[in-house]
Image: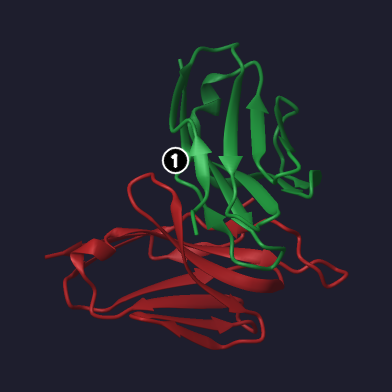
Chain colours: A red, B green
Amino acid sequence: SQQGEEDPQALSIQEGENATMNCSYKTSINNLQWYRQNSGRGLVHLILIRSNEREKHSGRLRVTLDTSKKSSSLLITASRAADTASYFCATDPLMNYGGSQGNLIFGKGTKLSVKP
Amino acid sequence: KAGVTQTPRYLIKTRGQQVTLSCSPISGHRSVSWYQQTPGQGLQFLFEYFSETQRNKGNFPGRFSGRQFSNSRSEMNVSTLELGDSALYLCASSFGRSNEQFFGPGTRLTVL
């Protein structure tokens, strides 16, 4: 079952602009991870943010997490044509005993198109 | 460090056949998970292995099975293939639970 819901489903911007993608989820989590996928290839891990973290940066990426609203956002600054891809959020659900379920639950993704 | 490798990259099979896909995790990673990706259902979890034991299983029929070897390499098998099994099968490895999962390039299975 899908836990994460990305918004928007598709986003088209010009090179140099910022891109913001949002993700909402349903259950308590250990962490939330963002991935990129180019044209049906494998997933590339971008960033992991743990449930006790609110914000994380990696290069041009900024991820925020609001566990009270069960939502996260991924911001890509100064986008490039090479950023064109699908972006997925994936949650690591928290089990009742406090551990990890061991598998990630993915949303349907946001298709980002960056025009040169 | 070499990434996750999957073989073969592409497969074409006919209905009723069976198929075996292979995954070699990143060196030192003992957890291997498998996912199926289709346009309609998105990314769906199949199973997770750790130290040769299946720790978790998704909601797939018994035709889907897997195993993990002592060197952490994993295989998944799909028997009696159906048209709906056409998908990209992705393998991911991680050092442990609640860590980053690193994905391989996937195996594109087409069932005719």
Q: Is residue B88 left or right of residue B80?
A: left
The image quarter in which residue B62 lies:
top right
For the residue pair A79 and A71, the one nearer the viewer reads as A79
Q: Is residue A18 left or right of residue A15?
A: right
Q: Quadrant of the C terminus of chain B?
A: top left
- Can you name the residue that lies furthest to the left here? A116
Q: Chain of mark 1?
A: B
Q: Secondary structure at mark 1?
A: loop
Q: Which residue is mark 1?
A: B39
x, y (%) of residue B101? 58, 60
Q: Amino acid at mark 1?
A: Pro
Q: Residue at x 49, y 28 (%)?
A: B86
For the residue pair B72 and A73, the one nearer the viewer reads as B72
- Can you name the residue that lies furthest to the right here? A97
For the residue pair A107 and A46, the one nearer the viewer reads as A46
Q: How many marks?
A: 1
x, y (%) of residue A21? 40, 71
In the image, residue A47 above or below residue A35: below
In the image, residue B37 above or below residue B110: below
x, y (%) of residue B46? 66, 42
